[in-house]
């Protein structure tokens, strides 16, 4: 492998990693326009294993807009990223697949009128974890998501009493 090819591979790895990070930030920040822009035109996502839906990026963004209102505090941690480049129409490096684990702590929204803003939240925490499968496509605009598949492996709701013990 030449230095030029090795450099191109490193640049692609960094770009793919940045796209996965942008995905997590868009979901955590509730930036659904940014979320949509991460996908290729025919991109899809499947959140069914976590109790969600499967569909195109626009449909998923609309569903997330409503669903994530119950979790105003979110923080995706995407780790253990395993990246493999593939081929499309015999052109090496046009596709990529990332397998990555996630831990996603969130906080339920406060009930209306329950606590003043200056008081610590008493809403329960919700934490889940599992694995993402990301299929990516190199486009003229850079790497984009063709498919996101969430495989939730576990979840836990921490009630107020549990939180106070910590």
Image: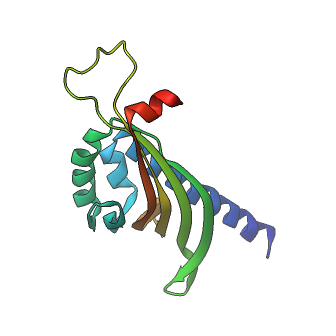
- Note whether 118 is above or below 77 in the view shown: above
User: Horizontal and vertical percent for residue 150?
Assistant: 41, 64
The residue shown at (36%, 36%) is 124
How was the colour assigned to the protein in this rendering? rainbow
The residue shown at (53%, 71%) is 97
> Is the N terminus in the top left, top right, bottom left or bottom right quadrant?
bottom right
Q: Residue furthest bottom?
A: 90
Residue 41 visible in the shown view: no
Q: Nearer the viewer, residue 162 or 76?
A: 162
User: Horizontal and vertical percent for residue 120?
Assistant: 40, 19
> Is the C terminus in the top left, top right, bottom left or bottom right quadrant?
top right
Rendered image quadrant of residue 60: bottom left
Q: Nearer the viewer, residue 132 or 118?
A: 118
- Note whether 146 is above or below 16 in the view shown: below
User: Horizontal and vertical percent for residue 121?
Assistant: 37, 24
- Note whether 108 is above or below 35 in the view shown: above
């Amino acid at each position: 492998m030449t230095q030029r090819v090795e450099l191109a591979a490193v640049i692609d790895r960094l770009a793919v990693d940045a796209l996965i990070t942008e995905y997590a930030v868009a979901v955590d920040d509730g930036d659904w326009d940014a979320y949509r822009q991460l996908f290729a035109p025919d991109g899809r996502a499947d959140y069914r294993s976590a109790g969600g839906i499967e569909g195109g990026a626009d449909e998923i963004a609309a569903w997330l807009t409503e669903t994530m209102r119950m979790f105003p505090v979110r923080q995706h941690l995407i780790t253990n990223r395993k990246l493999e480049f593939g081929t499309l129409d015999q052109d090496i490096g046009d596709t990529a697949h990332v397998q990555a684990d996630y831990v996603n702590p969130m906080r339920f929204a406060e009930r209306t009128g329950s606590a003043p803003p200056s008081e610590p939240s008493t809403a329960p925490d919700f934490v889940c974890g599992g694995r993402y499968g990301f299929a990516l496509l190199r486009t003229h605009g850079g790497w984009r998501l063709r498919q996101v598949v969430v495989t939730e492996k576990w979840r836990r709701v921490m009630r107020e009493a549990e939180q106070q013990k910590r």
